Amino acid sequence: MDSNYRGDLHFGECYKKLRDKGFIDDLTITVIWNTDGAQPYKMSKNGIWPFMATINEAPYKLRRNYVILLALWFGNKKPPLHAFLDWIVKEWARLENDGINVKGIHYKIRVLVITTDTMARPLIRNTTQFNGQFGCDFCLHPGID
């Protein structure tokens, strides 16, 4: 394959390094988590926050058509971090440690990436939003009011 071709996650340098180090092999299922909030309709004061996963080893069309819904939050505020993530992280830690058996084959499970937009990232990381006091990820400046 052409080394300049960038067609999918499997061709990326980070993915290759993880394979070289043995973190990923042919018996590993890797996933990407994603979350973002959205209003169900234009004037709504409520938001819907789905927390989803996709399986990287699935063919692209299947990956796009079959997204796994891990959790769903509906409310007039962002979801509280612990109510939203505690059980997901606990269950996925168990899956990473114990793996999963599918048709007699034992697979390891690995979460590679959690993707969010700028507004959802502080929720997942339990940090201050970018426009709040000490909201910068790269420095310790408190910001300007």
Image (spheres, rainbow, N blue to C red):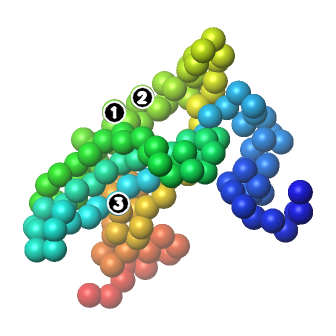
Q: Which residue does the numbered mark 3 point to in the structure image?
A: 36
Q: Would residue 25 appear left or right of 73 to someone viewing this image? A: right
Q: Are marks 2 and 1 in contact (CB under 8 Å)?
A: yes
Q: Residue furthest right?
A: 2
User: Mark 2 against mark 3, which lies toward the viewer?
Assistant: 3
Q: Residue at x 38, y 55 (%)?
A: 35
Quarter of the image that includes the N terminus? bottom right
Residue type marked 2: Glu
The residue wearing badge 2 is 91
Query: Residue 27, located in which quarter of the rendered image?
Result: top right
Q: Nearer the viewer, residue 42 or 97?
A: 42
Check whether the beta carbons of the residues at disc 2 and disc 3 lie within 8 A of each other: no
Residue 83 vertical placement versus 139 (above, below): above
Measured in 3D between alpha carbons, the distance from the residue under mark 2 to the one under mark 3, in whole angstroms, is: 21 Å
Left/right of residue 16 with respect to residue 53 in the rendered view: right
The structure residue drawn at horizontal position 51% and vertical position 45%, both measured from the top left corner, is 54
